[in-house]
Image (cartoon, rainbow, N blue to C red):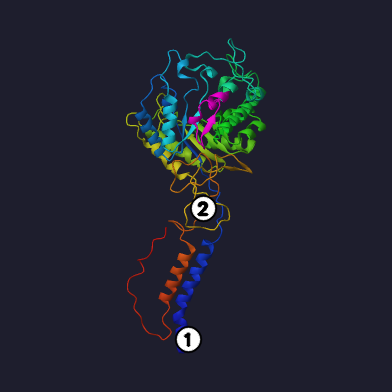
Amino acid sequence: MAHCVRAVRLLPGVLLLGLSLAWLGPMAAPVVASSAPSWGVRSIDTMAMSKDRLRYQVSASSILRELVTDRSTGANTVAIEVPYDPASSYSPPVSPGYEATWVNTAHALGLHVWFRSHWNSWQGDYNFPKETPTTTPARALGTAGPVLAGQDLTSYLAMTYHWILNHPGYFRNGDIFTPAAEPENAGIAPYCHGPCMFGSVAIFNRWLQDSMTVDRAAFAKLHVNVQVGYWGNSGWTATHGYLSQATVRAMGVLAVDDYLQSPAALVANLAQIEATYHVPLVVGEWGDIWNGGNQALMGPEVNSVLAAVSRLHYVVGFNYFRDLGYTQGEGILNPSTLELNSSGLVVAHWFNLMTPPPAVAAAAPLTSSPPADHGPPVVPVGQARVGPGPGLVPRPPSLSAAPAAVLIPAVTSRAGGTPSAPLLWIVALAASLLVVRPWRGRRRSWPGHWGAGPVMR
């Protein structure tokens, strides 16, 4: 009878120990990859100040305040649109160093820069005459071979190639470079008015491919890992046969400017693009241009669109256009204080929610040691790595995280982190011994209470 009593008294401890061991099993198991959507590119566009104020340049302190607020959204990238032309080429000349101030400030804040511009003669900006292969004076598009051989120094392809080589201090690993933003806006014959930049859709595709070839070669010469492409083709262009499969494969990631107000229409358009090309997508431009900055209307609309896009696993980035909005009111910053307005807080909510968790190697055991490298992560696209380089991103979200999608996010089964397996064994064993009564039936009191104990982090 005494043995039976002892066995009954042991039962709670045995059960607790068994449950603890069962709980420990999955915690020590290899990490399983998560397919939860995330945005490796979380970008805020600065066009209103970086390009539109080139003749009326804002101060370095204002640029700093603006970019600090942009970063507070959880953005890891800012898009800067200063044209590639030198300051002395304007009439009258503009103050030099404006782009350098933007770029250096962004990098100093741990942000990546998305160079998202073109030459002024590309579309005739800032009173520059538009120059195409058929205008007078003319400007050739260029092809990769002569540019890389040093035989072409004057085409658009050659000018951009040498602009990169002549500005090595502008670039950091993980930046993005767009050779000519929204290239179809320069005109594709026969579907354009005025001087058309591209004589046909085939020429358009050939030039996009050659641009990526020569500009990637330029960055290779500088030994810096910058992603080239992210063109900002319109959602309409991407669904109407203007982009060939070869061109999109060369891009690796397809950035589309998709100004659709309805979340359902935007999702449908993005789904059609993905079904056509089967590559990761980045929303290269979207902002609320319909409500004139009315926050009561704008906030819910921004929220509904970001919520809808966040559920698309093939969308790996989002560039909100823009931080300061004037004529169309799409801005997320108060122009007087440079602080986030209510729509900016909505963007911040979704940017932080869509920040990739830390990346870990597949099938690696959990460890309590911090990662050795906090460099930018890599985007896996099939077997191709199109991200900016190896490394891990710490949690909470790093504002210097690279514009790339997460590798394999760590999965934990308890809120607040994953305790190490040895610690869990000790806790489980101690708990079991506390519950088990001594074999001889002596009563023993235990000081303290179960609420006190180590904090698992």
321 relative position to 217: left or right:
left
Identity of the amino acid at label 2? Answer: Ala
Q: Nearer the viewer, residue 431 or 112?
A: 112
Secondary structure under tag 2 reads loop
Mark linked to residue 265: none
Q: Residue at x 56, y 30 (%)?
A: 235
Can I make out residue 348 in this image?
Answer: yes
Against 174, is 80 above or below?
above
For marks 2 and 1, the one nearer the N-term is 1
Q: Which residue does the numbered mark 2 point to in the structure image?
A: 410
Q: Which residue does the numbered mark 1 point to in the structure image?
A: 4
- Single out the residue that lies furthest toward the bottom: 1
271 relative position to 299: left or right:
right
Q: Residue at x 43, y 48 (%)?
A: 396
Q: Position of residue 111 (x, y in %)?
A: 45, 37
Q: Position of residue 15 (x, y in %)?
A: 48, 74
State the extent of the magenta-drawn residues as a range. Answer: 161-183
